[in-house]
Image: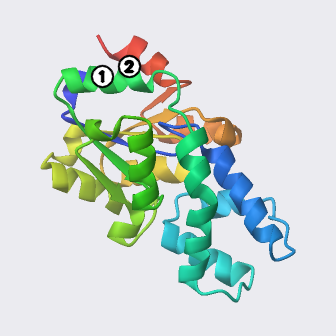
Amino acid sequence: MIDEFKAVLFDLDGTLVDSMWMWHAIDIEYLNRFGLTPPEDLSEAIEGMSYDETAVYFKERFNIKDSLDKIKSDWKEMSKEMYCTRIQLKAGVMRFLDYLKNKNIKMSICTSNNYTLAKELLKSLNVYEYFDNIVTAGMVGLGKPNPDVYLEAARLLGIPTEKCIVFEDVVQGIMAGKNAGMKVVAVFDEASKNTTDKKKELADYYVDSIDEFIENYCN
């Protein structure tokens, strides 16, 4: 099946790397600074938002007096060391990247994360050179489920949308890929396991791991 496509567009956090636990931990630590406890719906509420959109959401919902730049700067400082030293690729990812490279299939990162953090993480994992570009929701102005981040990646690659396939771990990301007119593979992640049924409903394919995708769809 993978031979039908000329480009693979990957979400990063929760899809290629096991990192969602870290962002949740940062949310807790950050709000604790202001004597606040993260509400139960926080992760779902900010799912798919760009870095900038998330900062606006925190500032407005939690009445944080710091500027948006200060909020984002604090997050970067809190995450930088942990992100590039404790986050690892998920099972099967390295094998899949090698497979796609050998097939001359283009690859992009399409993330709601900050560009600098995403780039530094990919370099720390020695996979930065596999990707033709990194497109962030902040670069296009709108987070997922808007399709903009995926449409921009396809445009930069010069690949028609129908020849792109998306890998995502959350509902908002799956919707973004579908809204871009692309096929979408939903990948299991522990942090979003409570939405597995919805992910299966929305996506064209669902796998518990990248290894499973390789075994079933890469011949």
Question: Residue 111: x and y, percent?
Answer: 43, 53
Task: Find residue 118 and name its label.
Answer: none
140 sits left or right of 28 in the view: left
Please identify the quadrant where the C terminus is shown: top left
Question: Residue 209: x and y, percent?
Answer: 52, 24
Please identify the quadrant where the N terminus is shown: top left
Residue sitting nearer the eye, 3 or 118: 118
Three-letter amino acid code of the residue under disc 1: Asp
Residue closest to the far left: 158
Labelled pair 1, 2 in contact (Cβ < 8 Å): yes
Residue sitting nearer the eye, 12 or 22: 22
Residue sitting nearer the eye, 124 or 31: 124
For disc 1, the marked residue is 98
Task: Find residue 95 and name its label.
Answer: 2
Which residue lies at the image location 16% right of the left edge and 48% below the top edge?
Answer: 157
Q: Please tell me whether mark 2 sits on a helix, a strand or a loop.
A: helix
Three-letter amino acid code of the residue under disc 2: Arg
Question: Residue 100: x and y, percent?
Answer: 26, 25
Q: Is residue 191 above or below residue 219?
A: below
Q: Is residue 13 above or below residue 210?
A: below
Residue 11 in view:
no
Say which quarter of the image contains residue 183. top left
Question: Residue 67: x and y, percent?
Answer: 59, 87
